[in-house]
Amino acid sequence: MNWLRAVALTTVFLLLVPIVILLYYGLGPFRTPEGYTLGVFRSIELSLFSSGLAAIVDIAMFTPLAYYLARGKDPFAEALVDIPVGIPHPIIGVALLILDSPLTPTGRFLLFFGINFFNTILGLVVALVIMSAPIYVKSMQPYFESRDPSAEEFAMGMGASRIRTLFSVVLPDSLKGVASASLIAMSRALGEFGSISIIAYYVLQYPFYGVSPASVTIFQLFSGAIPGGLNAAVTASAAMILVALPITLVGHLIRRR
Amino acid sequence: MIEAKVRKQLDQFSLSAELEDSGFICLAGRNGSGKTSLLRAIAGLLPVDDGHIRIDGVDVTRLPAEKRGTIMVTSNSFFPHLDVDSHITWGARLKRIKPEEGKVSKVKAELGIDFGGSVRSLSLGMRTRVALATALLASPKMILVDEAFSILHERDDFIASYRKLVSAEGMDLIFSTHDEMDGRLAEHLYVISNGTTRRQ
């Protein structure tokens, strides 16, 4: 067991080495005021806001799916849930662009109703929901599966439908699971870059007019699109990690307790 | 009245059981004899391969659990987030049944539910009493008690009280147990062994 523990902890440490190094340089030798300007903080604010909103949408829309997969045993639906995660993320950005383009009937339909994804908070949140919902579902599903089904079967015996059982019996007793899964999904959304760098490179809406999501801002600093250079990119990255890390850790710790 | 003739293959175990009776029924058998599988089949929680299940003359074989009017009670049949009083009337409220004046307090008194508070904080025996009261007040056609009686304090007296309440409501009940001697607490005794039932 001690050897297993040693191997396990070594591999986790290896995974974290780049992050630890980045934190060291970002908070130490490379630290520069250009990495924590108001613009960078506005970016982090936009990322927190949009990822939090995406996590709320995940809870509202995808909890029934997670419960269905846990109790329904539907391998086809289970495979479908994984699709957005399994393809390169920029493709999701391109797909959203096509879906909402004036060149396509679906786009003309959506735009007719004023639904615009391109460089809007809506587009940003939709992309983040697509990328984080599978994580939310895959986190909630085992939580539901691990529940003793007796209470649910008891409720169904009294005439409650599956959906009624979910909302009246299962969810009130699963708040810890929902909080944990949504925080894990939110941290996944915070880390998204590929899709949002296409659909919402920056947002042109109040209160985030002209603000880019944090991952995009860090890329812009790194590539020189905005001044600051590598030192600023490393500093902003360290700041972003310090914001994202507690969300991930709390998400995991809630479930353990 | 329950008329069940079911067949179900579960890995290496084969359930081939028949049961035809009404009233308070005891189903006795050892571990792994098929008691829970038979009760789950009747409750609609385990689809059967072959056969039929009729309750009060209505064929429910293909009906989902929520449409059968059969409530399965185990020692884990409780909603921890509710308090005792709202738990006891949960099923009745779901079905929009308003229990007659004094019925809830009568059931609580008969079943020794002289406590309140959150169901989460109750002992296993207390929770089971609450679950059995909840099932009764939900007015099903049939209650299926899967070994839940066995953990109760003063069990025989409790079963006698519950039997009185169940028969006053005109419901049927099947309870499973390891002990054939428990047949004395019921109107009818079935013994199940290797998935096959035998009426005593």
Image (cartoon, helix red, strand yellow):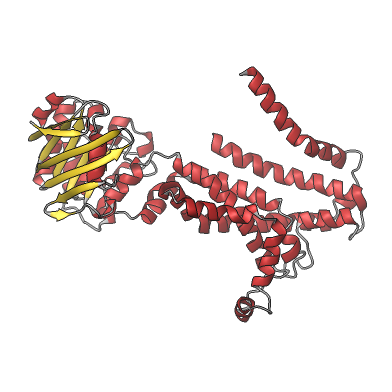
In the rendered image, which quarter is residue B157 located in?
Answer: top left
- Residue found 81% across the figure and 57% down from its top: A217
Which residue is at the front of the view, A183 or B161?
Answer: A183
Q: Quadrant of the C terminus of chain B?
A: top left
Residue A71 spot, x, y in % from top left: 41, 47
- Residue found 82% across the figure and 39% down from its top: A23
- Residue found 88% across the figure and 56% down from its top: A223
Q: Residue furthest top?
A: A2
Describe residue A252's horizontal placement relative to residue B102 as left or right: right
- Residue found 39% across the figure and 43% down from its top: B81
Q: How many marks?
A: 0
- Residue A209 versus residue B4 in the image, above or below: below
Which residue is at the front of the view, A46 or B11?
Answer: B11
Residue B130 spot, x, y in % from top left: 27, 39
Which residue is at the front of the view, B5 or A243?
Answer: B5
Q: Is residue B182 visible?
A: yes
In the rendered image, which quarter is residue B38 located in?
Answer: top left
Residue A234 spot, x, y in % from top left: 86, 46
Q: Is residue B71 visible?
A: no
Describe residue A36's horizontal placement relative to residue A164 as left or right: right
- Residue B69 versus residue A24 in the image, above or below: below
Describe residue A134's horizontal placement relative to residue B79 as left or right: right
Residue B127 spot, x, y in % from top left: 30, 35
